[in-house]
Amino acid sequence: MFRIETEVDKDRRMLLGERLDSSNTGRSPAMRALRGTPHDDEVPLEVWALEPGTAELAGGLTALTWGRWLQVDLLWVADTHRGTGLGTRLLDEAERTAKEDRGCLYARLETWDFQAPEFYQKRGYAVVGRVEDYPPGATEFILTKRLA
C-alpha cells in the first residue's frame, strides 16, 4: 500500500522534475533534440525599469527562456506609468534579448481577462487557448507570438 503525503518537499520536487524530464526525453524526439544544446536549460530573464535617480521600481518583467521559447511570467507597470509605453519597452527588451542573445523563435504567456489580453494582442500575440472560470468569474488567456 502506498503512503500518500501532501507536504511541500523541495528535494522531492527536484527529483520529480528530473524523473519527468528523463521520461519525456525518452518518449519525445523533440525533447531528445534539445538535450545538450544551449536551449536545454531554463534560463531566467528579467527586465527592470527604475524611477530616474532612484532605485524605486516603476515596472518589471520576469521570464525564462527554454527550448527556443520565451515564457513571460510577470509583467507589471506602476499605475503612474501606465499608458506611457513602459510596458511595451519592457516586453520589447525581453523579446529582443530572447531572440538576439538566446536564439528564441517564439514567445508565450498567460494573462487574465481583467489584466491585459488586448495589450499583448496589439503587440502581435495571438490567443491560442482560454480557460473559463479560472479563477471562478475570470478567463485566463494563453497567447503566443513568433519572434523570428
Image: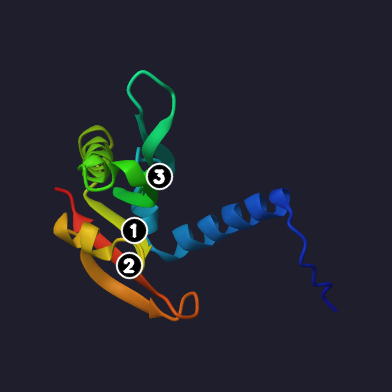
User: Of the residues under marks 1 and 3, which one precedes in the sequence?
Assistant: 3
Q: Residue at x 23, y 53 (%)?
A: 106
Quick one: 21 or 10, which is closer to the camera? 10
Q: Residue at x 24, y 37 (%)?
A: 93
Label drawn at residue 40? 3
In the image, residue 79 above or below residue 100: below
Q: Residue at x 24, y 70 (%)?
A: 127
Disc nearest the viewer among 1 and 3 = 1
Can you say which quadrant of the picture contains the N terminus? bottom right
Instruction: Locate residue 103 relative to residue 13 in the image: left or right.
Output: left
Scheme of image coloration: rainbow
Q: For the residues labelled 1 and 3, say whether their Cβ atoms are less than 8 Å apart.
A: no
Assess disc 2: are there few (<14), some (14-19) or many (≥20) residues with their C-alpha within 10 Å of its C-alpha.
some
Amino acid bearing label 3: Asp
Assess disc 1: are there few (<14), some (14-19) or many (≥20) residues with their C-alpha within 10 Å of its C-alpha.
some
| Separation of residues labelled 1 and 3 (CA atoms) | 19 Å
